[in-house]
Amino acid sequence: MPANELQQLKKRLSDIASLRSAAALMHWDQSTLMPERGAKHRGEQLAAIERLAHERSTDAELGRLLERLEARSPADATEAALLRVAREDFERDTRVPGAFVEEMTAHVTETYHAWKKAREARDFKRIVEPLKKTLDLSRRYSSFFPGFQHAADPLIDGSDPGSTVATLRPLFAELRARLVPLAREITARPPFDNSCLRREFDERKQIEFGALVIRKLGYDFSRGRQDMTAHPFMIRFNANDVRITTRVKKDDFGEALFSTIHEAGHALYELGIDEALEGTPLARGTSSGVHESQSRLWENIVGRSRPFWEHFYPELRDSFPAQFGDVPLDAFHRAINRVERSLIRTDADEVTYNLHVMIRFDLEIDMLEDRLRAEDLRDAWNARYEADLGLTPPHDGDGCLQDVHWYGGLIGGAFQGYTLGNVMSAQFLEAARRALPGLDDQVRSGRFDGLLSWLRANVHSHGRMRTGPETVRHATGRDLETAPYMRYLEGKYRALLGTR
Amino acid sequence: MPANELQQLKKRLSDIASLRSAAALMHWDQSTLMPERGAKHRGEQLAAIERLAHERSTDAELGRLLERLEARSPADATEAALLRVAREDFERDTRVPGAFVEEMTAHVTETYHAWKKAREARDFKRIVEPLKKTLDLSRRYSSFFPGFQHAADPLIDGSDPGSTVATLRPLFAELRARLVPLAREITARPPFDNSCLRREFDERKQIEFGALVIRKLGYDFSRGRQDMTAHPFMIRFNANDVRITTRVKKDDFGEALFSTIHEAGHALYELGIDEALEGTPLARGTSSGVHESQSRLWENIVGRSRPFWEHFYPELRDSFPAQFGDVPLDAFHRAINRVERSLIRTDADEVTYNLHVMIRFDLEIDMLEDRLRAEDLRDAWNARYEADLGLTPPHDGDGCLQDVHWYGGLIGGAFQGYTLGNVMSAQFLEAARRALPGLDDQVRSGRFDGLLSWLRANVHSHGRMRTGPETVRHATGRDLETAPYMRYLEGKYRALLGTR
């Protein structure tokens, strides 16, 4: 009974989804509200739920069901996509032997703790030995997926299916060739004054203002909520419960607001996925790149634009008259778009951000190709920072120890999504502009429903029905390209530099 | 390898515990913080997790493991208790056929919604047909457990193992014989004035005061938290995460405070269970009666006592000077101990509360014995209220439709725990007094650690290692008896009536 087998498959997948949703809630609770002493047992319970989910996602009977269903032609596109992603997930979960997963998990957990200490001590040497083993594990992980060209490809495929070293390298090279001179040109001039953002801002009022903004963007608090955490994140429990978190700094106005818009951008994506896909593995953002495109689109292209602040600045001034009463709109707009060569990726502006990412991407590839030894990572890092940004980290904590990615997971596939997302975001926005000629005026009058509807129809609703590259092609009519992003950045900064 | 089999059993039980903990968190989140539109999918996900837990708790391999372990002698008392409760749970879960559980769940869900409407319409007749079926299902449920004497016994055993109709009837009869005249004697005099509790109280300050009180009682906010819900409850996620909820009424000071102490009492029990039992089914309060004894002990025997308020009243007056500045301690103490004949169980005072419970217990038994037909429940209810409390409900909403128990579950076993708990609470406190001669003075000076330590050592720590009756015997040296409770109530009200 084929129809019955499809039902069986869906039931199995939806049980896995329910377990993952339970695990996600346990994780969320742990990060937001959990009483501190609950941590130990919660960790054990969460590990148990994840193990039960993993047991189900690698169950041989699931594989047999997939085989039987793959042998006949799918009833429609949704069924075809469901079989495709279920197969992808099944392969990803079953090809890696359990003993390897255990070894890897134990090593990564240890390394994470060692990294925290090394970063505190600002001493890369302390983490070299664990890093060597991580590199070895990363290559072994890759070897379980023999179909790929490059050792990094299976790792990239884990977060950005459809992207490979072969597609990313030329894209990034093209981008870097234009970003380095742009950054140089802008930073040759004195940086925009952003002292107005460093005044003292009541934390509660910052949260309230952020909530007001994202509510207008379309984040529906009856389908989500916002809480405080040390590191902001977005988390999906189901089609109608997608939550975000943020953090606030009293003396840095940008921190809470832009992280709030960023996470709301991720959440709008998940909330826009067709509810009919709920309970299946299709009901998820399709890749790290597309996800990042949505967060960065709202945070940067919309949230740091002049029309956006033409609408919101009067409200902001009402909320913080003492802080912004003496700051004209143009000065505020320049402040939130200050460009400077800096050492820390997460603090970087729109122009230099991708340079940070590409340094990491190149170093990952070099390490996986054995052209860079783990023990030489620090020197290579510092040399690249000098070459691309003209800066050398004063210590390893602000250098090659700054990001958790290589020390809390495998090496490879962890960074490309950030830049893919930036590039996509501009290409999506150009396409949206063609469909919505009055977009800037809409934004200027605080109306974001046109843009959100366009994104829902062309990007969000499809979830994993389309891969990242397919999403770009369908939404924009073209393959991913850097031109829209460079047009956006160059246009924006030409205007900004012209206004002073 | 027997040791290995014990490990296997523990692993299986701990996986079930982790699933139940995940389900509990999903339930808690749903009741406290969940965005409203998440309800539908959360309900589905929660049902899936509960089904997965049930599948595991009824797995035939679990039964085989138990058999093999039962065939040899246990290494120690903990292993013996573990095998006993694991067997009890396994029997309870496996004897009832899956088809019956489905039929029952569907019927109860429907009945629950029908009851809400019937209660709103104040019309018992609307719910008679569903109630007949519930009664039939309750008898069929019983029939799966042939070892018991009375049809209600398997239902009672589900929440109060060790108690049966045969043990409860004489206990309740004895209690009723003394409670009815006591209630009559007290209510023959004008009731205590409680108007001071009906002034206006800032809701936030009520919560703060409640938190201050339970913190002093020993509730540790690093091992729990308090949130707001429509109906207060306590919920355990693990040995170090036991949360409570409460509700606040602006014009009823008793509501939040006493429900807070009540739920904290439940939580102190769960937090006091030996952490070494964590992950096993022993790590839970042993019965509904013992649980209720802990909540009522703190709420009533301690929380409505004069020494307690000798300590807290100055702080209460500091928090609410306008409301209590003109109210002497004695008047306040009388107000929170007002006795009156009333129609609603959940609003009842200490003296009349058990009369409400016993009416329900007797009617349950009569229905299960077929001496009372479902369609005659209302008349029987009203007749008993007239006989025991001298009141007739003005409508069914304040009568036989007031409690959810019979309409949201089976009939039988739902009420006895409340009165068992009251009776136990006084017997525990008498035993504690023998061990702690200065107890009243400790309470008077705001020190509760002596009492809490005694309860931990003699009641809490053992969890399900001891049944309810065993817990009473070990902690007090005697079987459960009504004398301490009557001594407590009569002594308390003699003193209270003497003070005016």
Image (tube, coloured by chain):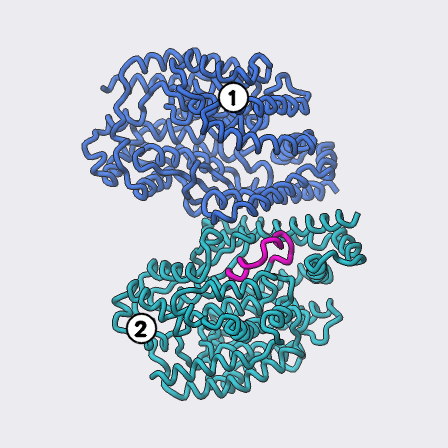
Chain colours: A blue, B cyan
Q: Residue at (69%, 34%) from the top-left corner?
A: A98
Give amino acid for label 2: Cys
The secondary element bearing badge 2 is classed as: helix
Res B190 label = none
From what the image shows, is residue B458 above or below residue A293?
Answer: below
Q: CA distance from mark 1 to mark 2?
A: 70 Å
User: B54 or A478: nearer the eye?
Assistant: B54
Q: What residue do we see at 58% from left, 23% from top?
A: A129
Magenta residue check for A217? no
* Mark 1 Cα shell of 10 Å, populated few (<14), some (14-19), many (≥20): some
Left or right: B293 in relation to B94: left
Residue B9: x %, y % from top left: 72, 51
- Let me know if marks 1 and 2 both belong to one chain: no
How dense is the environment of label 2, judged by Cα within 10 Å: few (below 14), some, or many (20 and up)? some
Residue at the left extreme, as displayed: A326
Q: Chain of mark 1?
A: A
Does residue B420 appear to the left or right of A494 in the view shown?
A: right
Amino acid of disc 1 = Lys
**Residue occupied by mark 1:** A125
Identify which residue, B124 or A197, lies in the foreground: A197
Query: Does A226 sit left or right of B386 as displayed?
Result: left
Q: What is the quadrant of the C terminus of chain B in the image?
A: bottom left
Look at the numbered disc 1 and give the secondary structure of its residue: helix
Q: Position of residue B145 (x, y in %)?
A: 73, 68
Q: In the image, which residues are magenta?
A: B266-283
Residue that numbered label 2 is attached to: B196
- Judge whether residue B127 can be spotted in this image: no
Residue B270 colored in magenta in the image? yes
Is residue A262 in view?
A: yes
Above or below B307: residue A166: above
Front in this rendered view, residue B256 or A83: B256
